[in-house]
Image: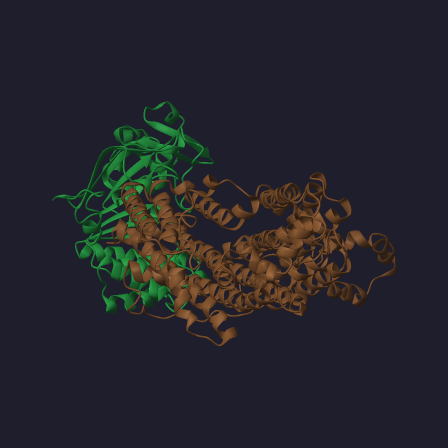
Amino acid sequence: MPVVPAQADVLAPEVAARRAAAPATPTRRAPERRHGRRAAARRGSTFTGTGTLLRFALRRDRIRLPVWVAAAAALVAVQSRQSQDLYSGPGDLDAYAASVGSNPAIIAMTGPPVGLDTIGGAVAFEIGTTVAVVVGLMAVFTVVRHTRGDEEAGRTELVRAARVGRHAPVAAATAAAGAGGVGVAVSVAAVAAATGLPVGGAVVFGASLGVLALVFAAVAALASQVVEHPRAALGLGGAVLGAAVALRAVGDVGDGWLSWLSPVGWTQAAHAWSDNRWWPLLLGLGAVVLLVGGALQLVDRRDLGAGVVPTRPGRERAGRALSGPLGLAWRLQRAAMLGWAAGIALAGLMFGAVVDATLELADSNPDLVALLPGGAGDLVDAFLAVLLAMCALLVVAAGVSVVLRTLGEESTGRAELVLGTATDRVRWLGSHVLVALVGTAVLLALAGASIGAGYGLDTGDPSVVPQVARDALVLLPALWLVVAVTVALVGLAPHRAAAGAWGLVAYVAVVAMLADSLGWPDWVGALSPVAQTPAVPLEEVTVAPLVLLAVLAALGVLVGLAGFRRRDVG
Amino acid sequence: MAAAVSVTGLVKTFGRTRALAGLDLEVATGEVHGFLGPNGSGKSTTIRVLLGLLRPDAGRARLLGGDPWRDAVALHRRLAYVPGDVTLWPAISGGEAIDLLGRLQGGLDPRRRDELLERFDLDPRKKARTYSKGNRQKVALVAALASDAELLVLDEPTAGLDPLMEVVFQDDVRTARAEGRTVLLSSHILAEVEALCDRVSIIRRGRTVQTGTLAEMRHLTRTAVVVATREPASGLGAMPGVHDLRTDDDRVRFDVDNAHLDAVMAYLGGLGVRSLTSHPPTLEELFLRHYGDDAPESPPTAHHAHAAVP
C-alpha cells in the first residue's frame, strides 16, 4: 500500500524547516534529538491521525468492503468452475479460442484474447473486465464516501478540528480502499487457486485487480478534491472507470495501443495464466503515486468544503420552471440525468463504432459466419441486440435511481417540507415517477441513437441512427416495469426499497449478461422483463409481451402511488 | 371561538417506541400557543400528525375544522409550517427555495418576502449547502411568514438563530398575532414562550401534563422568596408549604406554595424584614417541577439540541 499510515509521524517539510530555524539551546537539544520522533509526533504532521482514521474507516465499512470483495471473488469462482466444466475435453479450448478469440464484439465486451489456449487465460478473458468494473466501483464508492461524503456532511470538519493532519482523511480513505484492494487480491487469488487454476497465474490475476483498486481509489481521491459534492465526485470517478473500460474495448478490438491508456487495460496486460507479467502493474502503481500526489496538492490549495471548481452563486428568485412538484423533481434530477445521458451516449458511440469491425471480420472469417445461423447480416444484428441490452441496463439503473431518490428526500426531511405545503402526496411522488419514466424513454432512445451514430459514423451511413433508436425503444416496457416495481417498493416497503430495487436490477443484469455463458436453465431468467422482450433487431418484434409488460408497469406505478398515499412519511 | 387545533387522546407508536400516549392539545383561534416538552416528548410527532404526514394509531385530531390526514392539501393552503430541523436542497439557492415553498403553499407576498429577507439578514443568492442551520431556518421562516396562512405551525423555529434574530422572530410572531393569525409554537426556549405565548401546553412522554395560561400555571405553583430579617428566621423550616430552604449569611431563600404565602409573610413580619424580594416562578422552574423530579434523564435547558425525531 503506497499510502501511508507509516508516514504518520514523519515530519512535514514546513515543520522540519521550523525546527531547523528555531534556536535551540544545547541543554534542550540533546533530549530533543533523542526524542525527535516523539517530539515530531507530538507536534504532528499533515498525516497525523491517518492510522486512526484508517481503522475507523475500516470499522465503518466492515460490512460494505467485505461484500464488494466477496462479489469480486464470487464472480471469479463461478467463472472458474464454469470454464473448467465447459472446456474439459481435449480440443475444447482450441475451438473456444478459434471462435471467441477473433470475435471483436466479444473482445470489446471482455478483454484482449491472450492465453486462450489455457483454461486460466480463458477465465481471465471472460471475467476480467466485469471484475475490474466491480473492483473499480468499490474503490470509487469507498473513497468518495470517506472524503467528499464526510466533508459535505460536516464530519470532516469535526475530525480535522481534532489532532488530525490535513492530508490524513484523504490518505486514510485511499488506504481503506487499498485495504479493499488487498482483500480482492488475496481472495481472488485464493478462490482461483482453490477452484483448480494454477497458483502462479492466480496470484498475478489477484494482484492485477488489487492494483486496479488502488488506481481507482487514487482517481476518486483526486476527483473528491476537484469537485464539491459527493455525487459529482462519484460521477467523475465513474466516468473515468467507464472511459477506461471503453478505451480498452476500442484498443483491444483495434491494434491495442489505446488499451495502454486504460488502467483496466494495464490489469489485463498482466496476461495472467499465460505470460504472468508483473511489469504492467508498475504502470498502475505509478499512476497511483501521481494521482494521490495530485490529490494531496489540491488539499493544500483549497478550503475545507470547497472544490477546485468553485460553485457559482445561485439565483435570487426562483424561475418559472420551479413552481410545482414536477418542476422541483426535474430540477433535482436534472444534473444526474444529464450525467447518465452523457455516459450512455459515450458508451453507445464506442460500442457502435466496433460494429463494423465485426462485419469485416465476419467477411474474412468463414468459421465465424458458420457459427451463426443467419450469416453475416445476422451477426451484426446479434451484436446490436447485445449492445442494446447492455445500454438498457445503464438506462434502467438511471430510472431506478431517480425513483429511489425520493427516499433520500424523505429521510432528510425535505419531503416533509414540501408535503407540509399544499402539495398532494401523489403529485409529489408522481412527479419523480414521471421524470423516471420519461427519462428512461429518452435515455433509451439516446442509447439506440448513439449506438447507431457510432456505427453510422464508422460506415458513413447515418440512416441507421433512427432505426437503432426505434429498435432500442422495444425494450422500453421492460425497463418501465423495473422502474414501476421500484415505485411499488417505495410506496409499500420504503425501508427495503433500495435493496429490493437494486437487487432486481442486478438480477436483470446477471440474466442479460451471464445466463447464456453460464449455461443456466431458461427458468432462471423467466422473471426478467428484459429476457421476456424480443432481442431486437435479431428477433422479430411481437406485440403481446410488450403490452403485457406495459400493463404490469402501469399496475406497479398505481400500487406504489396508492401505498404512498396511505403510509407515514418521513 | 372555534379551536384552530383540537387533539384528544392521540396515540402513535413506532415499533416498540410509544411516541404519543394519549396526548391532548387545544389551540384557540387567534392565540399564540406554546408547546413545551423535553426531547423526545412527542412535540414533533404531534405536529407531523397535524400535518397529515403521520397517521395516528388512536385518538382524534382536528385542524382548522378539517381532518388533517384526509384534507391535508386543502388545510395546508391555510397553514404554514417551519420544521424543527430545516433541510434544503443543496444546489438550490435560498431565494429559490423561498419562492418554491411559497408557490407550493399557494403564493406569498413578494414585498413582504423582501422585507423579511432584509430583517433576517439573509442572502438569498447563496446555495443552500452553504447555509448554516440558522440560515436554513430563516429560509423556512421567511417562506412561512411571507405567506397569508391563518395558522403558523412552528417547530422549534429559533433553535439555530442568534439572539438578535430571535428578537426579529418575536416581533414577527407578535405581528402575526395582531393580524389575527393563530400560532402553534413548539419550543425549548422558555424565555421565548414566556414572551410570546398566550397559553401553554406542557407535554412529557407523549402526554399532556398541563395546559393553561401562564398566569393560571403560576397560580398552581410557588413563589420564590429571598429575605433578610433582623431576627433569625429559624422557624421557617417547620412551616407548611415552605420548600427548598437555604440560608446563606443573613439571607434566606425558599419557595413557598401560594396557598401558604399569607402565613409565611405574617411570620416574617414579626422578625423585622430588612429586605425582601419575591418573584413568580419562571417557566424554567415550572419545567423542573414537572420533569425534574422523576425524569432526571431529560433535564430541560434553555438552549438545547432540537427535538429528537422518532
Nearer-the-camera pick, A77 or B274: A77
Residue that appears at 43% across and 48% down: A531
In the rendered image, which quarter is residue A169 located in?
bottom right
Q: Quadrant of the C terminus of chain A?
A: top left
**In screen coordinates, is A510 left or right of B283?**
right
Residue A164 seen anywhere in this rendered image of the structure: no
Residue B161: horizontal and vertical position, in percent? 39, 56
Residue B303: horizontal and vertical position, in percent? 42, 47
In the rendered image, which quarter is residue B144 located in?
bottom left
Residue A262: horizontal and vertical position, in percent? 64, 64
Which chain can be seen in green? B
Residue A49: horizontal and vertical position, in percent? 67, 51
Nearer-the-camera pick, B129 or B146: B129
**In screen coordinates, is A369 left or right of B129?**
right
Which chain can be seen in brown? A
Colour basis: by chain
Nearer-the-camera pick, B209 or A12: A12
Residue pushed farthest left?
Answer: B1
Residue that appears at 50% across and 68% down: A349
Residue A192 seen anywhere in this rendered image of the structure: yes
Nearer-the-camera pick, B68 or A521: A521
